Image (cartoon, rainbow, N blue to C red):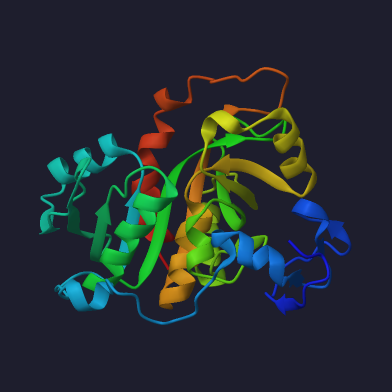
Amino acid sequence: MNPTASPVALSFSTPRKGSLGTGGHRFDSGWLCKGCVDSYPILEYDPAPEAIIEPARVIRPRDIAEHCVLCFFRDVVDRVVATHNARLVADNRWEDGPHPLYEIWYNGRRLAFLHPGCGSSLAAALLEEVVAMGCRKFIACGGCGVLRRGVGLGEPIVVSSAVRDEGVSYHYLPPGREVEAHPQAVEALERVLRRRGIPYRVGKTWTTDPPYRETASKVARRRNEGCLVVEMEAAALMAVARFRGVVFGQALYAGDDLSGEEWDDRDWRSLRSVRELLYLVGRGGVP
């Protein structure tokens, strides 16, 4: 790569002025040298509004609720289906199995929900499909690892923004360090938590694809830039929502602990409170 190659503007959300990129290329005031763009496919952002497989052209709209919860706890989804006479809206079948979209009448309004799969790629694709079907306001609920001491087991985290250390968001937004949650969704989640007297935190998450490559050095870096927690989907889902012009926010329950020298699972999956998260956001947390 030629270090003197002409730069192109890529609108970095938080430029690291003067910091060195790979091969000695500098990121200055949001500028990235063209040699870097030509070398890394992940930076080849294409703002074209339509793709070859465009969801709105291949998925028919449904008679579906405006509000939708993406719940990463499959046992909670199954229990809601069994106890609330849920209506099957769409039987989404992927290679790993079904990810059906359901709807119930809850708290005086229609509410759609589904398990979006794990990982940014699958979750983002399923969000695309549900947007094409007609839902417009979303809350996701799931678990996360904590990066800071003092974040209690089971403590709710309202995500304010996400560090984009995954792949999906770079296909929906220009390269940048972070993506923010929709303020309307953040306010709705805070409102319902305050109303129910539940202590919570608002903070930044680190979205990364490989859970087995969360090294001590990377954890320290993310903690130093303000991340409270780590998970695998938030940045991708926020990017899709922004690209499609829909409202999206995320609530997480603090689970395993990565803040010390050794990983602590804390047996977080056994928490009863985790299984109540869908009910919590469904009761008023969806904007």
- Residue 175: x %, y % from top left: 62, 66
- Residue 256: x %, y % from top left: 55, 27
Relative to 85, is 181 above or below?
below
Relative to 112, is 224 above or below?
above
Instruction: Write down the quadrant of residue 258 in the picture.
Output: top right
- Residue 51: x %, y % from top left: 34, 75
Residue at (18% x, 73% y) in the render: 58
Residue farthest to the bottom, as pictured:
49
- Residue 78: x %, y % from top left: 20, 39
283 or 25: nearer the eye?
A: 25
Can residue 287 be seen by looking at this rendering?
yes
Can residue 283 be seen by looking at this rendering?
no
Residue at (36% x, 36% y) in the render: 275
- Name the quarter where the C terminus is drawn: bottom left
Residue at (71% x, 78% y) in the render: 8
Whether residue 58 sits left or right of residue 116 in the image: it is: left
Instruction: Write down the quadrant of residue 246 in the picture.
Output: bottom left
- Name the quarter where the N terminus is drawn: bottom right
Instruction: Write down the quadrant of residue 208 in the picture.
Output: top right
Whether residue 205 sits left or right of residue 134 in the image: it is: right
